Image (tube, helix red, strand yellow):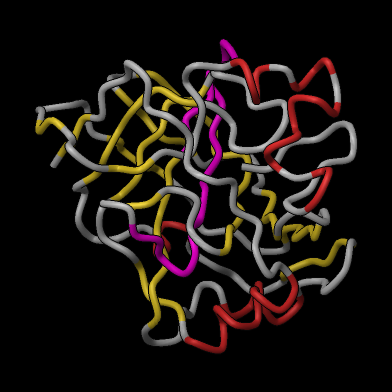
Amino acid sequence: MAGTGHEWGYDGEAGPANWSELSDDYHVCGAGRQQSPINLTDATRANVDRVTTRWSAVSDFEVVNNGHTLQANMPEGSISLVNGKRYELLQFHFHHQSEHTVDGEHYPMEAHFVHKSDDGVLLVLGVFLDAGQENEVLAPIWAVAPKSKGTARVTATIHPQDLLPQSSAHFTYAGSLTTPPCSEIVTWVVYEDPIPASDDQISGFAEVFPHNNRPVQALNRRQILQGF
């Protein structure tokens, strides 16, 4: 997930190992006990609350290269529901390689769909991207995406819902933002099945963001649940 604040990055002195030293606001990046991402393994199968997505088709929306990722900002009107609680879809963005791992293995990319409830709680849906056929939803975004810091607009109509896998099988756990300030206010739902993106789409993103994934963090005393 993309955050804001003092200058940070993924390499060298500004990299993840030093985030907590860059600003007092980032101390949780080092001291937190519920940090993300994690390795998704040894999950407990459970009848957990499913996420119901009610996302609208969108057109004429903003795509931002913020120097850390490519982010699509969503207009109001798309929500997700968990146990009756309403979360507004704010934006989705991408990481290369995937931030979460499954049994220690990365996928080529991962998308994060960031939601916020009225009381400030964040829900993030994570979707892995694997090499396959061209992704038609991503195509108009990639076509205009700035290759350096900047903003563009997508005028084509896309259906963000088509960026979710057909299967609802997922992992869920309590975690954090994966970028500074690393706030531990996130309910994570990471789908098991990946969606496809072409080799050209993956390599095109990687040319701009060679690696923008935080290393996996300690699970500590948390439990990973596996829903279906």
**Main SS class of the magenta portion in the image:** strand
| Left or right of 134 on screen, residue 119 | right
Does the magenta-highlighted stretch encompass residue 122? yes
**The image quarter in which residue 129 lies:** bottom left
> Viewer-proximal residue, 145 or 74?
145
Look at 55% across and 39% down and name the residue there.
114
Q: Which residue is drawn at 37% across and 52% down?
A: 101
Q: In the orientation shown, which residue stands out farthest toward the top? A: 119
* Figure quadrant of the C terminus: top left
Q: Which residue is drawn at 80% across and 60% down?
A: 65
Which residue is more in the foreground, 192 or 164? Answer: 192
Question: Viewed as shown, does residue 170 lie left or right of 216?
Answer: left
Q: Where is residue 149 in the image (x, y as percent from the top left)?
A: 89, 62
| Residue 200, percent from left and from top | 56, 89
Query: Where does residue 7 sit, x and y in percent of width and height?
Result: 89, 40
Please identify the quarter of the rendering in which residue 178 is found.
Answer: top right
Asked if the magenta segment contains residue 183, the reply would be no
Task: Point out the image quarter for the N terminus.
Answer: top right
Which is more toward the observer, 61 or 194? 194
| Span of residues in magenta | 105-124
Residue 81 in which image quadrant: top left
